[in-house]
Amino acid sequence: MRTTITLILGAATVVLAAVIIRSARRKKAGQMQEAIADEGYETAHDILYPRRGRHYGDQWHYGPVLPN
């Protein structure tokens, strides 16, 4: 009985943590998209869409870049 309660509480904690983390990420993404929408089209692509640690190597692209 005791191990069952412990497992249920552990699973509930993991689910609650996942919900909180997902909610925080969605809120942050929404704020970033709202900031991008407020900026307009004059802002540089690297400011609108930061790479955040993604490593693309030394591939440089000159000219307009359209988001996916």
Image: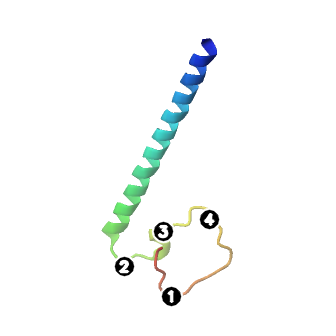
Q: Which residue is mark 3?
A: 49
- The amino acid pointed to by label 3 is Tyr
Quarter the N terminus occupies: top right
Residue drawn at x 56%, y 29% is: 11
Q: Is residue 25 above or below residue 5?
A: below
Question: Helix, strand, or loop for circle 1?
Answer: loop
Earlier in the chain: of badge 1 and badge 3, it is 3
Amino acid type assigned to the residue bearing label 1 in the image = Gly
Q: Earlier in the sequence, mark 1 or mark 4?
A: 4
Whole-Å distance between the Cαs marked 1 and 4? 21 Å
Q: Disc 4 designates what residue?
A: 54
Dot 4 falls on a residue whose secondary structure is: loop
Image position of 38 with respect to 27: above or below: below
The residues tagged by marks 1 and 3 sit, at their Cα atoms, a distance apart of 15 Å
Residue occupying image coordinates x 51% and y 66%: 50
Pointer 3 or 2: first along the chain: 2
Q: Quadrant of residue 5?
A: top right
Mark 1 highlights which residue? Answer: 63
